[in-house]
Amino acid sequence: MLGSTIFVTTLLFLMMKVQSTTLPIKILTHNIRYAANPPATGEKPWSIRRQLILNELHYHSLHNAESFICLQEVLNNQLTDIMNGLGSEWSYIGVGRDDGKTKGEYSPVIYRPAAWNLLTWQTVWLNEDGAVGKKGWDAGSVRIVTIGTFKHVQSKKTIVAMSTHFDNAGTVSRRESAKIVQRVTANVTNDGALPFFLAGDLNSETSGEAYQILNNASSIMQDTKEQAKWMYGDQSTFTDFDDQDYSLANPDTITKYKVAGDISQRVLKEVSGWIAPDANIVELCERGDKLLEEEVSKVYKGKKVQKGIGHCTTISPSSYITPYTPLKSDAEEAATTLKEGEVVKIQLGAQIDGFCTIVCDNVIVGNSGEVTGREADLILATHYANELLLRLMVPPSLLPYSDEEEQKKAATKKPYTQSQMTSMLEKVVKAYDCNLVESTTIWLFDHNEIESKKKIILAPGEGVRGDGLPESGEVWGVEMGVSLGSGKVKNNSNRTTLHRRTATTYQLKRPTSRALLSEVVKKFGTFPFSLRQLEDEKGAKVGVVECVRTGVLRQYEVVVDKDNQPVARLFSTVSIGKNGMQRLAQPTPIDVSKYKSDKKIEDEEILKILEQPIGKTATKKKNNKKKKKPAKKAAAGDAAAAAEEEESDDEE
């Protein structure tokens, strides 16, 4: 049923004739605003708008080969840019309204020839006699409607597509144009015998004559805005030129990160309290996701802010390295429970308006008291390695020093390279007879992106290398992985259930694949999700195969310690500004006194770095109490704890 299966984006006006045969079609209609030179006040030039519009068209037509794109206010140079940007898989019909060739604005219909055969097309001028390039009645500009008849390549079904732009100045012109469009539609569709749609900018309120003529009770047209179950998109016909500043210089960005971080931390703490012997992993993951959704729903109420789960809840058993989230429909894995004494990793995250914070922490199942032996070594090694990594990531000039001379030296010091980071971190973990997990990756975060343009790779495997170092004004997802074994990794036989949408485009063939991707786009955007979160888990297991094979989804395989030894992981989301580093979301700080080990860090350089706070206070506060300086030979834990007291809660 064409009318009920159409999806509309950037909705301005769309009418559709309903037919019983089902053929899902996505129709985009957008007044792109002609390339004025110079641009109007508050308007961005076409050179800037071009890529933004192409991004929108690519995104919304990505997974529906039958998509039609109807544009208005398109000059010839803009149409050339759009067609070049869309690529050779697309074609169009339409002419410039001023001369029937290339002059003036187009109202083109853009389509994929692989999906649609063009049967006939025409341009009708909306004036008294249909003369080319003539204004009609009281119109301020020449007006046209572009009409094409298409046959679907596979089903052989026929549809009529129309794109138009009514006059903004002339009320008579709009009224008479509506009458012409109505007559032409009746002629080309055999009084509605063929399915059709009209898309465009009518410059008319719903109470206006033009709209009423096309949408009255006796009309063969229906406004799909009234028929749609859900609707979103701009309600006006003028492009929104309001720039969004997603940088840390915008206080709103920091606020949203902090709100998301607070939710992530609170839910992580709650889920950690559920960890117990024989607890079922699937049930824990589901409870964690439910709590995330509940907490997110409490913030930014009544505001048009995208928000939700930034990383689904995962529970990774002892030797598992990567996040693990089994499915209910896989009976054997669904029965997996936690074992007394094992080190499990909990990872989850929340996102507010595309600003995501992810956290991961370790819990020893069934142990709430003192920890001894190799488990204590593992937790301490991971803790101190993580604290050192955070300090190594901060550009030296941003770290606070009590001595002015030291501060001047730091300003000229080069940042630590990735290989230097690995070398120093290895000293920490080897002090506890542990090893770094191979190819532990730290990613730069961005708006709607948790794997951006930079990455740091610790203990890189063969042929693997990182790219870039942290700078002021950035947010990073910092991961630390430590193993009681060699740190080498291997894939296990468990089903891969954790995925994330990529920027890759592909015309998926399987209905299950298209359905899965459509649900992913709506629910999760570009953030990690588990197949267990989808409506049809079994169908998702089928559809995900094509999505992964074609690259539209990235899969996160289940990776374990090669020696099947216990592994600990921590994950924090941090920002870097002129005052150093700030933890936006972090695992619950541990009480190092609970972990009894006969091992300790003795490297003087590392102990000195661990004494250093990761950020300097933006505003000094009076404190009459004298602080104890950590002894030069103090345990690393005391040094790190002292540093934490100096951390700033402020961010620029």
Image: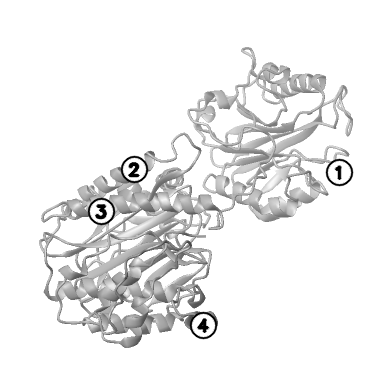
**Does residue 367 show up?**
yes
Which of the pair 134/600 is nearer the observer? 600
Q: Is residue 354 above or below residue 369?
A: above
Circles 2 and 4 in contact, beta carbons < 8 Å? no
- Near mark 3 (Cα within 10 A), the count class, few <14, some 14-19 or many ≥20, is some
Q: Tell me which amino acid carries mark 1.
A: Lys
* Upstream in sequence: badge 2 or badge 1: 1
Q: Tell me which amino acid carries mark 3.
A: Lys
Q: Tell me which amino acid carries mark 2.
A: Glu
Q: Which residue is mark 4?
A: 414
Whole-angstrom CA distance, mark 1 to mark 4, is 57 Å
Picture quadrant where residue 129 is located: top right
Tell me residue 67's x, y (percent).
59, 41
Q: Which residue is mark 1?
A: 103
Whole-angstrom CA distance, mark 2 to mark 1, is 55 Å
Circles 3 and 4 in contact, beta carbons < 8 Å? no
Label 4, secondary structure: give it: loop
Whole-angstrom CA distance, mark 2 to mark 4, is 42 Å
* Upstream in sequence: badge 1 or badge 4: 1
Q: Which residue is mark 3?
A: 269
Compared across the picture, whether 64 is left or right of 484 comes to right
Label 2, secondary structure: give it: helix
Q: Which residue is mark 2?
A: 295
